[in-house]
Amino acid sequence: MLTLILAFVGSEPCPGLPLTPGTRWTYRAEVAWAVGAGDSTGHQSVSWTATVLTIRASDSAVAATIQGWPGDLAWWTPGRAPSTSVLYCAGGRVYQFRSQPGTAPGLVQSLLNGQRRPTSDDLILQLPLHTGELFGRDPAERRDTFYAWFVEVAEPVPPSVRRLLPGITDSLYSVVYRTNPDYTLVGFVPGLGVAHYVYSHHGTTAETEAWLVAFQRGSP
């Protein structure tokens, strides 16, 4: 049964996002945060690892529990521990749910049996990616690309990232979510996952830029 599930994970529900138990992405992040109530700012270089803990699948979807998804680095401050997220993938759409301690198994079950249904607010990726594509809201709601995910550009994969997975033939896609107070950038490489992550807040200091420096695929 496990072999069947892992073979299924590599197919349509989550194309290009490697999800097998034990898969690890390690990032080097430069982080800045506000200190106290004044204008002081803290800076730190952080090593950050995201790890796939479990995988479960239904006939048409996959749910993975992941510790330390890169989004945890937004508003990071010293001592902040990685959280556990559930990634739910169906039809190429990837949804993220942050779970409280001990609640991830129940959340996975409710997603796979249809008791809980993801919404556009939970959507973080729509695979495969195409430059100029907007997702996460109705394009007719606004004339700009704010308050939605927008695939801004596809660029050659940097050599420092390409070496982590020899044989990469696709691009580094920059997928950006802009709001009035902040923006988030996810740099996605098909077959490898999130290789670049940026969060920037325009008011109180909260800045993060992370690049993938190591990748280890889990064993089926």
Image (cartoon, rainbow, N blue to C red):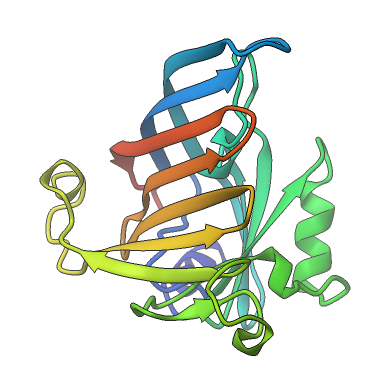
| Residue 209 to residue 65: above or below | above
Q: Does residue 209 appear to the left or right of 64 in the view shown?
A: left
**Residue depicted at 39% across the width and 40% down the height:** 25
Rendering quarter of residue 106: bottom right
Q: Residue furthest bottom?
A: 140
Q: Does residue 54 appear to the left or right of 46 in the view shown?
A: right
* Number of dots carrying numbers: 0
Q: Position of residue 62 (x, y in %)?
A: 60, 69
**Residue depicted at 84% across the width and 45% down the height:** 103
- The foreground one among 193 and 125 is 125
Q: Give the quadrant of the N terminus.
A: bottom right
**Residue depicted at 42% across the width and 40% down the height:** 24
Q: Give the quadrant of the C terminus.
A: bottom left
| Residue 69 to residue 10: above or below | above
Q: Position of residue 34 (x, y in %)?
A: 61, 18
**Residue depicted at 67% across the width and 75% down the height:** 58
Residue 184 visible to an observer of this rendering: yes
Residue 52 visible to an observer of this rendering: no
Q: Position of residue 126 (x, y in %)?
A: 50, 75
Q: Position of residue 51 (x, y in %)?
A: 50, 40
- The foreground one among 103 and 207 is 207
| Residue 121 to residue 68: above or below | below
